[in-house]
Image: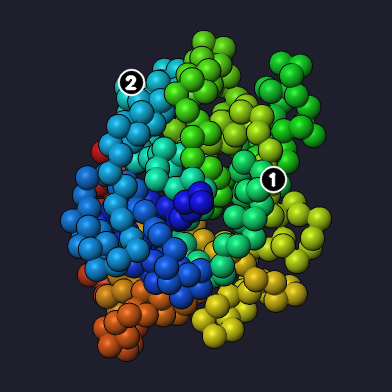
């Protein structure tokens, strides 16, 4: 039988978020489903120790696959128009984000990827069932974004005469949650896409430089494989929100549901929240995060005695120090 499992991407910086995600998967997806953690970088001491305590969790160790995707990303983004203003090989943020695409070379024949800043909220039967018919399954609203911030530059693509907006928009997606299959981007296919991007100039189809979600949207779009997005499902009960900073949810026994219709959601995504906020929250600071109680519940699900009993606001000294660090960082940039 085909193997199946879950991937995520993590390092020690997001340790608290990883623990919360793993606990939520065990509680709301399955206690037995295999989970493979792709290292964001080599800072994984705490992550490795946590994995060692969980029999169903492993560390992704196919370094050749990770290097293949890193080389691909370097080549593509160095050909982007924005690269002319930067030193070759540099990136405006962590290059490790592209490592999530190594899932296509991992041990699972079918898989679901969760961003590390997520909490799983329901089983994945529906996602894996959709993979009988589709090669990519998503659950996000990237396709609804305004044209200036969409994953692909619709007007530039239309000028090629290859596609219309109606062909492009429904296939736009992000990379925070997706289901797919092993081997789709085998070396010959990735070489073909790289040639289109670099030699064919299609790298200009992506508005933002070094964005793994934009690159992933391009790859799935140009691979011309069947794609399904739950937010475009004809079944209205499958169309929900997922963002902690934007969508309203209802908590029923520590599981969140879409406020409108109490529809089950696949995951809560804490996008736009800095990872250090979750570290501070886990240490008892009253960090400004929506659905912080839900995060703390899953973070300390197996160690309830270690959960902060009271959240305290940051001290003035801590606030001043963080402000100073931001100033220094801006000056360095």
Tell me if mark 1 has few (under 14), some (14-19) or many (20+) residues whose alpha carbon lies within 10 angstroms of its own: few
Residue 287 in percent (x, y) is at: 38, 72
Residue shown at the point (73%, 41%) measured from the top left: 170
From the viewer's side, name the closer residue of 48 and 321. Answer: 48
- The quadrant where residue 151 appears: top right
Tell me if mark 2 has few (under 14), some (14-19) or many (20+) residues whose alpha carbon lies within 10 angstroms of its own: few
Please name the colour scheme applied to the rendered image.
Answer: rainbow
Q: CA distance from mark 2 to mark 1?
A: 40 Å
Q: Which mark is residue 115?
A: none
Residue shown at the point (60%, 34%) measured from the top left: 220
From the viewer's side, name the closer residue of 1 and 34. Answer: 1
Observer able to see residue 39: yes
Tag 2's secondary structure? loop
Q: Is residue 290 above or below residue 144?
A: below
Residue 64 in percent (x, y) is at: 30, 32
Is residue 164 shown left or right of residue 123?
A: right
Is residue 317 shown left or right of residue 241?
A: left
What residue did someone put label 1 on? Answer: 133
Q: Is residue 100 above or below residue 198?
A: below
- The quadrant where residue 273 appears: bottom left
Q: Which mark is residue 88?
A: 2
Residue shown at the point (66%, 52%) measured from the top left: 130
Is residue 152 shown left or right of residue 185?
A: right
């Amino acid at each position: 039988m085909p193997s199946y499992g879950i991937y995520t991407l993590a390092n020690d910086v997001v340790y608290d978020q990883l623990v919360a995600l793993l606990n939520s998967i065990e509680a709301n997806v399955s206690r037995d489903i295999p989970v493979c953690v792709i290292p964001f970088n080599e800072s994984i001491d705490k992550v490795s120790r946590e994995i060692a305590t969980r029999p169903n969790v492993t560390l992704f160790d196919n370094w050749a696959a990770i290097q293949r995707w890193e080389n691909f990303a370097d080549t593509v983004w160095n050909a982007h128009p924005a690269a002319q203003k930067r030193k070759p090989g540099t990136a405006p943020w962590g290059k490790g984000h592209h490592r999530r695409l190594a899932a296509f070379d991992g041990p699972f024949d079918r898989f679901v990827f969760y961003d590390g800043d997520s909490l799983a909220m329901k089983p994945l039967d529906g996602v894996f069932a959709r993979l009988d018919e589709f090669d990519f399954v998503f659950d996000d609203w990237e396709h609804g974004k305004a044209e200036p911030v969409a994953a692909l530059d619709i007007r530039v693509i239309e000028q090629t005469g290859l596609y219309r907006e109606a062909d492009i928009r429904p296939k736009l997606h992000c990379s925070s949650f997706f289901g797919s299959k092993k081997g789709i981007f085998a070396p010959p296919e990735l070489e073909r896409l790289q040639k289109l991007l670099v030699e064919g100039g299609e790298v200009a189809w992506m508005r933002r430089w070094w964005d793994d979600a934009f690159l992933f949207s391009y790859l799935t779009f140009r691979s011309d494989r069947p794609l399904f997005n739950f937010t475009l499902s004809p079944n209205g009960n499958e169309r929900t929100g997922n963002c902690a900073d934007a969508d309203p949810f209802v908590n029923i026994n520590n599981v969140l549901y879409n406020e409108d219709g109490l529809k089950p959601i696949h995951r809560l995504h804490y996008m736009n929240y800095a990872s250090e906020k979750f570290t501070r929250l886990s240490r008892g600071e009253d960090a400004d995060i929506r659905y912080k109680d839900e995060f703390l519940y899953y973070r300390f699900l197996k160690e309830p005695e270690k959960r902060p009993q009271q959240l305290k606001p940051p001290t003035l000294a801590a606030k001043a120090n963080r402000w100073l660090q931001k100033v220094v960082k801006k000056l360095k940039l």
